[in-house]
Image (cartoon, rainbow, N blue to C red):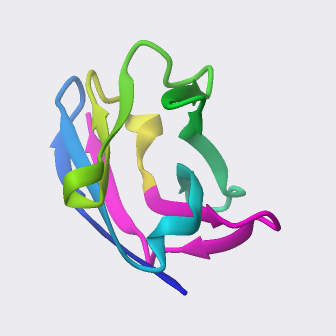
Amino acid sequence: QVQLVESGGGLVLAGGSLRLSCALSGSIFSVNYMGWYRQAPVKQRELAADITSVNGGDRTNYADSVKGRFTISRDNAKNTVYLQMNNLKTEDTAIYYCNAKSGARGVNYWGKGTLVTVSS
């Protein structure tokens, strides 16, 4: 089992920045994928950014809508994954969820989410 706890959401003006954190605990040794997903009102959940361990390094991937503005990173010593969000837009308003995939089967784990509201 893997537990995920997000933090860092809040209300920000358009053009501002926020940093989300996702703290991992439990059987984290088997986690091989981490992602930040978001769900806006009346929309489906979508990927914002993810990070995967590849050959000892990290490979990152971003949705086109956030490229150049969001950065995903992780601190293995703190068992934490971050999402730095800059130049926020009103359309970034959503609940942001942390996701982890574990083991060869890619078992999915989700946090409860953190709300990001961007006002104009």
Nearest the viewer among 68 and 3 is 3
Nearest the viewer among 61 and 88 is 61
Query: Which corner quadrant holds the N terminus?
Result: bottom right
Residue 101 is situated, as x and y percent measured from the top left of the image, at 64, 63
Quarter where residue 78 is shown: bottom left
Q: Is residue 12 left or right of residue 95?
A: left
Query: Which corner quadrant holds the C terminus?
Result: top left
Which residues make up the magenta segment?
A: 95-120
Q: Is residue 70 left or right of residue 31?
A: left
Q: Is residue 87 left or right of residue 67?
A: left
Quarter where residue 103 is shown: bottom right
Quick check: can you spot residue 8?
no
The residue at 27%/21% (across/down) is 87
Q: Does residue 8 lie above or below 26 as drawn?
A: above
Q: Residue furthest front?
A: 56
Q: Does residue 55 lie above or below 94 as drawn?
A: above
The residue at 20%/41% (across/down) is 18
Residue 25 is situated, as x and y percent measured from the top left of the image, at 35, 78
